[in-house]
Amino acid sequence: MTPGYRSTIFSPIAVPGRSAVILLCSLLLAAFGLLGTGCVLIPGKAPANTRIKPQPVRLPARILSHFFLVESPQTDGKTYRFMIDTGSSVTLVSPAVAAALKQKEKRQTPPRTLPVRGANGREVELPAVTLREFWLGEALFERVPASVYDFSELSAHLGLTIDGVVGFPLFRDTLVTLDYLNAQLEIAPNPVVAAPPVRQPRTSIIPYNRERATPHIPVQMENESFFVLIDSGSDGGLALNPAGLHPRFASGPRIGMIVSSLDGDKRQLVGRLDQNITIGTQLVQQPVVDLTEQLSSLGGELLRHFRITFDQQRHLVTLVRHTDGPVAMPGRRSTGLSFRRFPNYWRLIAVVPDTPNSALAVQPGDLCVRINGELVEKWTIERYGELVNSAAKITYTFLSGSKETDHEVEVFELVP
């Protein structure tokens, strides 16, 4: 199991004379059943103008480890890959995209930066740009505020190039649908006079908080209600902050994998609830949850069961399922080994304690070069996930100097 790239909450740093204050959320992302958290209290900036033709615009999406990815050509003639992140209040682009699409300044001005503070209090400065034109299929967004971030580590972890993260405010003047069921992004113009939503079978229409730049909806856990962020920039299921709540557990909670973020590496605390969660009229049966000190959130592991439409004009989110019955979440299988992925090797970060493999003769920092005899570069994040979910045992080959050593490890239920 590789480590997650976890969302990290940032708060603005007061800067005299600076009018653009944005909270950066859901930046570093989770993998293999981990999750992210998001958060904003101050609205993010929307594009200056949005044009959609034809109506609606539909783009094929790739659901990679529950992340929602789309590709689109830009004005420089190149096609770039973006992650759609409803938990982010800002759009982030790689240095290459920023250089190709940024609006030219009329006069020489010093480089702009966006100061943000992480949850650990550490300050980070991100370059700020305005994208003159930004295209998603035939949908054109003009003068888009964005921040610049290097996605090379995340790209290496996922095994494909990520060129940016599209934040929720980009779609402020649209009806945007993340159709996980059909792997499609749909963008339509907001009607001038919106008709009342029609309630249909397998459909939930839920109002979300108007004071935030990202969608926070109420959910129910038996007789307790709390708010969660709808966070497509996380591939986890339910991240639960138990403060003020009374969760009961059918399994766990127990120490889990390592999660990496800008705040450093942290251990998961994971378990399966003994209670059901209700999202509108949708029932999630005894979900696996990751306990968090940040805001509770719903990630791609749960969102993938729905077609989700966001109406930012009326602050409504519509969830549609294609099947009846409750949403069931499988258990989490694991080898207990946390890795950080690189193209030619995987570096061991930690081993989960009190598991069948906790006494394995390996140390953090050791390099894994083969899995079941094949070089790690052959193991995509999807293929490796399928292996962990199906195999009884996995053989990892670690490199010590010029010597390779095989370790056969058991795959077990981290959470039944």
Image: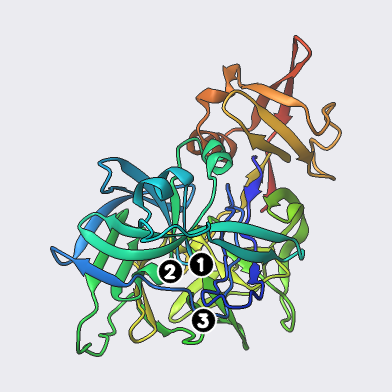
Q: Find residue 232 and report its horizontal and vertical position in percent.
A: 47, 62
> Circle 2 sits on which residue?
168
Dot 1 falls on a residue whose secondary structure is loop
- Would residue 384 be found to the left or right of residue 70 on screen? right
Please say if 362 is above or below 297: above
Q: Which residue is mark 1?
A: 87
Please name the amino acid that badge 3 sits on: Arg
- The residue where tag 3 is placed is 212
- Element type at marker 2? helix
Q: Is residue 264 visible?
A: yes
Q: What residue lies at 63% left-to-right and 77% top-to-bottom?
A: 16
Residue 255: x %, y % from top left: 78, 54
Residue at left offset 41%, top offset 46%: 99
Give the Cα distance between marks 2 and 1: 7 Å
Whichever of callouts 3 and 2 sits on the residue coming sooner in the sequence is 2
Pick the residue in front: 273 or 309: 309
**Label 2 close to label 1 by CB (< 8 Å):** yes
Check disc 2: other Cα within 10 Å, few if <14, some if 14-19, many if 20+.
Answer: many
